[in-house]
Image (cartoon, rainbow, N blue to C red):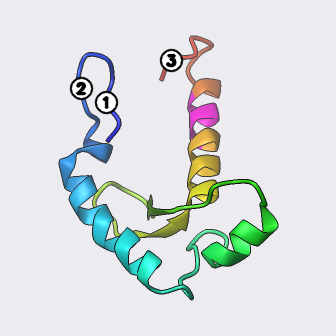
Amino acid sequence: MLARRDGFVTRLHDWAHQVRAKPVRDRAYADPSTACWRCGLTRAQVRAANPGRKVVWHAGHTGGRLDPLLAECSLCNWRNSAETTAAKRATSGGTGRF
């Protein structure tokens, strides 16, 4: 769970998200043929294409906070997070804050 230093947890990553995400990750680990919803590759394929990188299953957001969560490889999730953060910073008026 991601928390700021003051203990605030965003609604996107609150306890309810963790409860919804665990079964998604568990199902993905249980079935080796599970494909990432973003790149369409299985975990084994992503690991083969990215040797030396730790690849785990995340429960990826498909839209709003109440939209379904789907199995997503960690590399796609982190890439999307970086792109979203960069886009927010680019439109923040130069403050670097969202």
* Residue sticking out furthest to the front: 52
Q: Residue at horizontal 59%, vertical 48%?
A: 78
Q: Are marks 2 and 3 in contact (CB under 8 Å)?
A: no
Label 2, on which residue? 8
**Predominant secondary structure in magenta?**
helix
Q: CA distance from mark 2 to mark 3?
A: 17 Å
Under circle 3, the secondary element is: loop
Q: Amino acid at mark 1?
A: Ala
Q: Residue at horizontal 56%, vertical 54%?
A: 77
Under circle 2, the secondary element is: loop
Tell which circle, 2 or 3, labels the residue nearer the N-terminal end.
Answer: 2
Q: Residue at horizontal 30%, vertical 65%?
A: 22
> Residue 8, relative to residue 29: is it above or below?
above
* Direction from residue 71 to residue 26 in the image, left or right: left
Q: Amino acid at mark 2?
A: Phe
Tell which circle, 3 or 1, labels the residue nearer the N-terminal end.
Answer: 1
Q: Are marks 1 and 2 in contact (CB under 8 Å)?
A: yes
Q: Which mark is residue 97?
A: 3
Label 1, on which residue? 3
